[in-house]
Image (tube, helix red, strand yellow):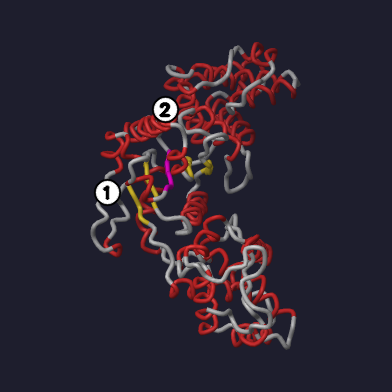
Amino acid sequence: MTAADVSAARRRDVLDALRRGAVPAAGLDLLAVGLDWFERSVAEDLAAVASGGSVFKAVRGEYGSGKTFFTRWLAERAKRAGLATAEVQISENETPLHRLETVYRRLTERLTTATFPPSALRQVVDGWFYALEEDVLAVDEAAGVNAAALDRAVGELVDRRLADVGRTAPAFAAALRGYRAALAAGDEASAAAVLAWLGGQPHVAASARRAAGVRGDLDHFGALGFLQGLLVVLRDSGFRGLLLVLDEVETLQRVRSDARDKALNALRQLIDEVHSGRFPGLLLVITGTPAFFDGTQGVARLPPLVQRLATDFTADPKFDNPRAVQLRLTGFTEASLVELGGRVRGLYAAGLPGDEAGRIARLVDDAYLGELAGAVAGRLGGRVGVAPRLFLKKLVADVLDRVDQFEDFDPRRDYPLTIGAAEMTDLERNAARADDIDLDLDGDVAGEGQAGPGRA
């Protein structure tokens, strides 16, 4: 898809996100630079999952190398392939990996499809029951005349479809039946409570749990069974699988040693379950820094996990195998930043009349993009890999918007690059300090009256 083919609403959403310094929620294909060499292996993985297989991948890269962008780009492709997706941020307090019930809960909270935003759990479950009713009626049209017979036949079909899940997590099927019964009785409050329990939420009303025939809260061991059940429901609802991203697993390095060891073992268990075929239709992706994968406080603490993630990165990165268990993101260069800036410029100009688009192309040409990219990277200690977020934020909010709105604005003459400490992330501030540059952390980075993309 070219910039000219993008709808006005989608173009606005992408540019608004870049203006805020955020990763756009959609439209990432328009900005994907340097990911073409992953496209074939990604397509193969998605095809394998869609046909009932299961795949695990680990994405490694330094902070700022584009891991979040990569996983969201992957999520867009997964949705186009008919998969549901969920992105879960691993954190010590909110979502500790050693407690898989919290991971499952966040999964259901962030479950999304090409049609439904998070949380899509209710729509998926309702679609599942509708599909079961259609399957029953396709076999026995008489069931459609008798509500009791239809209900009984659907209940039997639920048991058959979830037979494998029932061996390890019988409460999953019980909760689904309880949810349907509450809806049939017109008890919306109980139905919502049971669905919340099914999604791993704690503290659900005891009366709703009793009515559904379930007890207690979901625990670490039951979470894997519930994930297995969710995959069955997704498949029978017309989805071809699930992409689950566990982002920022490197945070495990900062937790207590006992919790870290439990989390690493939970990760090892998840990988083994994926490879065993227990989760047909699951593409599990984790992201982390090289320090997590290679350092003493990360994967190295659990030798079996080291073996499962072992990947040879001694060759030139251009020979990395995209089919390997680990994928290495090498980050941006100034040349790729210029290419990315050119794509954003084209997207911006595509929404403007011809003469205004021409002025954008003339004033914000590739040479200027190179100057701006070099200036932003220079303010960050020369660390180009840390620069993309600020580079795009400055390009859209401070350069393209002004060229668009002010006919006499020339960025080379009228724009002194300013980077305030308040708009930096911790990583960007650390990069700026590391180079010991003249950085006023309470103000802007640039002297008054300095023109051009910035003072080096």
Hey, what amino acid is under mark 1?
Thr
Comparing 390 with 115, the one in front is: 390
389 over 187 or under it: above or below: below
Q: Distance between the residues labelled 1 and 2?
A: 27 Å
Q: Determine the secondary structure under disc 2.
A: helix
Q: Which amino acid does label 2 sit on?
A: Asp
Residue 287 pos. (x, y %): 43, 47
Q: Name the residue under label 1.
A: 311
Query: Which disc number belongs to residue 258?
Result: 2
| Nearer to us in this view, 46 or 217 | 217
Whether residue 161 is visible to the viewer of this picture, yes or no, is no
Q: Is the magenta stretch mostly helix, strand or loop?
A: strand
SS type, badge 1:
loop
Is residue 423 visible to the viewer in this orientation of the structure? yes
Q: In this view, does 453 lie to the left or right of 226?
A: right
Quadrant of the image occupied by residue 444: bottom right
Residue 382 vs residue 390: left or right?
left
Residue extent of the magenta highlight: 282-288
Residue 376 in percent (x, y) is at: 54, 72
Residue at position x 45%, y 74% from top? 334
Residue 3 relative to residue 247: left or right: right
Residue 388 point in image, percent of width and height: 52, 66
Quadrant of the rendered image containing residue 55: top left
Disc tally is: 2
Residue 292 location, x and y as percent?
38, 45
Question: Based on the displayed image, in which of its 4 quarters is residue 346 positioned?
Answer: bottom right
* Precedes in sequence: disc 1 or disc 2: 2
